[in-house]
Amino acid sequence: MELDEIRDAFAFFDAWEDKYKFVIDLGKDLPDLNEADKKPGNLVRGCQSQVWLVTELRGGLMHLAIDSDAHIVRGLIAIILAAFQDRPPAAIRTFDIDGLFAELDLLRHLSPVRGNGLRAMVRRIRQEAELAA
Amino acid sequence: MADLHDISSDFPILARSVNGAPLTYLDNAATTQKPRSVIDAIRHYYEHYNANVHRAAHALADEATAAMENARAKIQDLIGAAESREIIFTRGTTEGINLVAASLTERFKPGDEILVTEMEHHSNIVPWQLLCQRSGARLVAGAVTPAGEIDLDDFHAKLGARTKLVAVSHVSNALGTVNPIETLIQAAHDQGAMTLIDGAQAVQHFDLDMRRLDCDFYAFSAHKMFGPTGIGALYGKANLLEELPPYQGGGEMIEHVAIEGTTYNQLPYKFEAGTPNIAGAVGFGAAIDYLRGLPRQALREREHELVRLALSRLKQIPGVRIIGEPGERASIISFLIDGGHAHDFGTLLDQQGVAVRTGHHCAMPLMERLGVPGTIRASFALYNSPADVDRLAAGVEKAIEFV
Ligand SMILES: Cc1ncc(COP(=O)(O)O)c(C=O)c1O
């Protein structure tokens, strides 16, 4: 889903129920990672849920494959992908992901204290972007 | 007798709301909330008699020292220790266990064994692993049954002449299992092994009597029994504590220091280097006073009833699977729900103001043994009510609609 579509959808939600249903549905639509790619080297360990991340440079653009064992985390990953997928590394480095999550009122899920692995994952993507730039 | 229904009004925080819903606090195994009397006692200490202890000849220092020693006496009385010098102030359970592990180092040699169980909290595993690394001793873990109890046959099989120390939790923080520690302590002593009980989850629920229990060490934290964070107590038998070397060096723990060598202070100060957490000790004492002022037996029965209600309500919800069915359970229920990860349900419950814990609960070997990645854990305290159980059950039912 495009970032603008996500922004538009969120603008209409009044109740938390609608927002979380939407996030969970985004998660359900996220393609699964190959089992073979769910290996320790690709694991970003969270205290409560786990995230697997594979990055690849395709024609100068960052291509990401990400998965998690938790639905809500998968939905949040879908939002991060809407911002990052197949973008030039320089754009990823400068994208204000905290600003986006604050706008969607989801910022606390990016908090390092939540222990869901997302913050560490974003840091890893940024590092890869740094190296590729 | 205090009105049982008024308990929650003693805890100011319980009046707040979370995400627009009334707070339903069911994470009591992580830390309990604090009654107003504890909060007031800490404030009163800082406003009226803050001073360093045991060191100065002025009124404030006398009052602070008296308050600290008074708290020690209350702890002694609460757990039925023979002498107040058997009570050492620590930062909490974790530090108590680390203190014992550090001070026991010289007593262990290669070939010796330390017996724990698979259900231990990491703080009753890792300090022993460190001791093993220092001494060449070996860590052995007694198995846990699928019901979430210590496998007694396996425990007795692993307890032998090599076992120098048995370290077991009184109550499992992950499953709520109440362990038969009297039997385990007796069996350990029959083999000549020392015993340490991790009482973090037990002190708030049981009347303890160290003289009867006869364990060598018992560690617990104030913050899980309505007291402040950053303070706890380690009970140790006086004769053992006398023999052990200090844990940390510094002020307070010495009798005389010369560059050539130092003689140590008497118990318990030998193990209390540096300025202690005086405000914490004051709050700890106030928490004990608070507990003692309540009709505890009636409250315990009510809490038991509440846990039974919560168990039966959760079991009625399709898709809910209770993890651990111990014969004797303290106020902790671990469960999983089909179709989603524990983290999803924790997040969806939080949106409804219901605070539970999700994850491995610092007991990864236990999760591994039970074959689960983690659980959702609801844990109760004496201020919880049937309305809290209703909100938990309704919250779970609603969360299930999402996934
Ligand atoms: C069984 C058990 N042991 C040890 C601990 C550690 O206690 P603390 O963090 O207060 O030192 C806890 C608390 O999390 C616990 O539940």
Image (tube, rainbow, N blue to C red):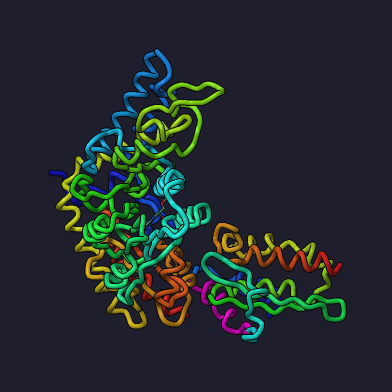
Q: Position of residue B225 (x, y in %)?
A: 32, 47
Q: Is residue B350 above or below residue A5?
A: above
Above or below, comparing residue B202 to residue B51 in the picture: below
Q: Residue furthest left?
A: B1
Q: Residue at x 32, y 47 (%)?
A: B217
Seen in the image, is B394 located left or right of residue B301? right
Q: Residue at x 50, y 68 (%)?
A: A16
As drawn, B257 above or below A118: above
Is A30 one of the magenta-colored residues? yes
Q: Is residue B1 left or right of residue B277?
A: left
Count up the numbered dots. 0
* Overall secondary structure of the magenta section: helix
The answer to whether one can see residue A22 in this image is: no
| The one of B102 and A1 positioned closer to us in this rendering | B102
Q: Residue at x 43, y 23 (%)?
A: B255
Q: B393 and B119: which one is in front?
A: B119
Q: Residue B183, how many percent across, how many down? A: 22, 60
Considering the image in quadrants, where does the N terminus of chain B appear? Answer: top left
Residue B104 in view, yes or no:
yes
Q: Does residue B199 appear to the left or right of B256 in the view shown?
A: left
Residue B390 screen position, x and y as percent = 29, 67
| A126 sits left or right of A107 in the view | right
Q: From which residue to which does the magenta span run?
A: A17-32
As for residue B141 lying within the magenta part, the answer is no
**B142 up-or-down from A31: above or below:** above
In the image shown, does A33 or B167 lie closer to the viewer?
A: B167
Q: Which residue lies at the image location 32% right of the left edge and 38% below the top edge? A: B87
